[in-house]
Amino acid sequence: MAAPRATVATNEVDLINFLHKLCVFALLLGMMAATFAANVPSPATHGMVVSQSDIASHIGVDVLIEGGSAVDAAVATAFALAVTHPSAGNIGGGGFLIYRPANGEPIAYDFREVAPTGSHPEMWLVDGEYRFQRHHMSHMAVGVPGTVRGLHLAWQDAGKLPWKRLLEPAIELAEEGFTIGHGLARSLQRGLRRMRAYPASVSQFSKNGEPYEAGEVLKQSDLAASLIRIAEHGSDGFYKGRTAELIVAEMQANGGLITMDDLAGYEAKKRSPIVGSYRGYKVISMPPPSSGGIALVEMLNILEGYDLKEEGFGSANTLHRMTEAMRRAYADRALYIGDPEFNEGLPVTELISKTYGNKLRATIRLDAASKSSPDTFTWPAESAETTHFSVIDAQRNAVALTYTLEWGFGSGIVVPGAGFLLNNEMGDFNAGPGLTNPNGLIGTRANLAEPGKRMLSSMSPTIVAKDGKVLMVTGSPGGRTIINTVMQTILNVVDHGMNAQAAVDAGRIHHQWLPDTLYYEKHGFSPDSLRLMRKLGHQLEERQRQGAAEVIVVGEGNMLQGGLDGRVLDGGVAGY
Ligand code: DON
């Protein structure tokens, strides 16, 4: 009698084992499906791309699957974003790329726009009066674009697949069209208002002036032709010949400054990244002309002296310490940083030193907010457009890339016949010498317009490494909030032990020295914490949302976790 029972028992165990295996198998299948499905942040083992366009992320991963490097994938993703995410993805703007090879030294690629030769510090004044329109919304606001040279330079150094192959998907998307998502439909509706003055822009981004709706197809044939010239002639396909002529014709007809020589002479630069450390992690970020890396490391150095893990995410104690670190780093940002080629002896080493961090920390009172001083000005508002994406390949080479047209859709000017938008990045230069005033103008010297100068940026593509291996790739749009958003994604992973998605989802704060206001995301923090912060003397203001961090974290078992920012639509994690 015992034997049959034992048999039954064995069968039951077998059945349970079988069902268990089935469940695991189904789970794995589900994970794999999710990995390839749209918009689902999921683990992957080999490579991953997270960007603000699901289509572009998948194009990047296809390149990885084909044996391309992280840089190849970044180049293909960037060109695809120029088609599918035209508010910030671009060939008419500029940006920064941090590359950390699995073996070897990290490097920063600077393809920030430069001021055309005809620029000068007083170019935004008419009869001695500052003109906002001229500074931000005119052909004079267009800087010499850097994106195409920058992508080409990075590819020359670390690309494996043919250049043409990396442009093919973007060309096809522009030629054949792609389905407009809800995010793009919404931003086009807003962007169209500013494009009304420019017939080529209206023609490219609307149906005879009527906004596109989600689900409709957007074709961009002039853009396809420009991309084909880049595919065939490398970066010269943009900076010389037909495309350059079309840009210059548009400039000459409308009082813009960019010349054929400005375009032909544009150089992307390789720079040493800013490298700092935080609780044993290595933080690699963008040097000047970005203020991002310096301010980020300065804040982390201050915060290293506190036990944020013990204080906990979102507690008033943690928020107070973060706010005071932000206040101090943003003051230094305003006072010291600009294009290194035009500002001799920027105090970079000092600003990112542990000694300086300790010194600043000693000025923080734990029982009361400091006051930002001189309380003379607030800073001009910035739009929430720019885009960041993160890439890791199977060898664990990593790319963090942030690029922009400055405002959403940049200047709003599509180059007639060339099909791409021009930036309005000159707006990132200061208003004019000595023009700092209570209405929001800044006139400090380091960042005044000069021929060939790069305007100050906050873009902070960043890679975090631990024990010689990449741990995290992060970055965000959001103007001056970028640096704080990036820092918070790092604190969330390193101090608060969050996974990639939780780190991206968590509420964000922003303080930038002046105005002396702490902005916090709605629903991001408990009312108790906010009440305590007010009690400490902080001025608080609620914001709907801050940034769009697209993050990858290398988690347990060397698995890649995608952190997709749900604050914006249309993005996607793609992995394999
Ligand atoms: O370079 C900069 O810091 C700005 N031009 C970036 C613009 C931006 O992020 C706008 N908002 N997202």
Image: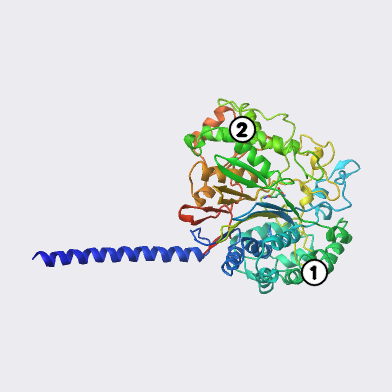
Residue 29 rendering spot, x and y as whole percentages? 42, 66
Between the residue at mark 2 and the residue at mark 1, the CA separation in whole angstroms equals: 50 Å
Q: Is residue 77 above or below residue 275?
A: below
Question: For residue 346, which quarter of the picture?
Answer: top right
- In the picture provided, is 413 more to the left or to the right than 490? right
Q: Is label 2 in contact with label 1 (beta carbons under 8 Å)?
A: no
Q: Is residue 67 above or below residue 41?
A: below
Graded by Cα atoms within 10 Å as few (under 14), some (14 to 19) or many (20 or more), the crowding at tag 2 reads many
Disc 1, SS: loop
* Chain-order first, disc 2 or disc 1: 2
Residue 37 rendering spot, x and y as whole percentages? 51, 65
Amino acid identity at mark 2: Glu
Residue 124 rendering spot, x and y as whole percentages? 85, 46
Which of the numbered marks, if any, corresponds to residue 324?
Answer: 2
Q: Nearer the viewer, residue 473 or 125?
A: 473
- In the picture provided, is 500 more to the left or to the right than 226? left
Which of the numbered marks, if any, corresponds to residue 417?
Answer: 1
Which of the numbered marks, if any, corresponds to residue 229?
Answer: none
- In the picture provided, is 494 more to the left or to the right than 412? left
Graded by Cα atoms within 10 Å as few (under 14), some (14 to 19) or many (20 or more), the crowding at tag 1 reads some
Residue at 77%, 64% in the rendered image: 235
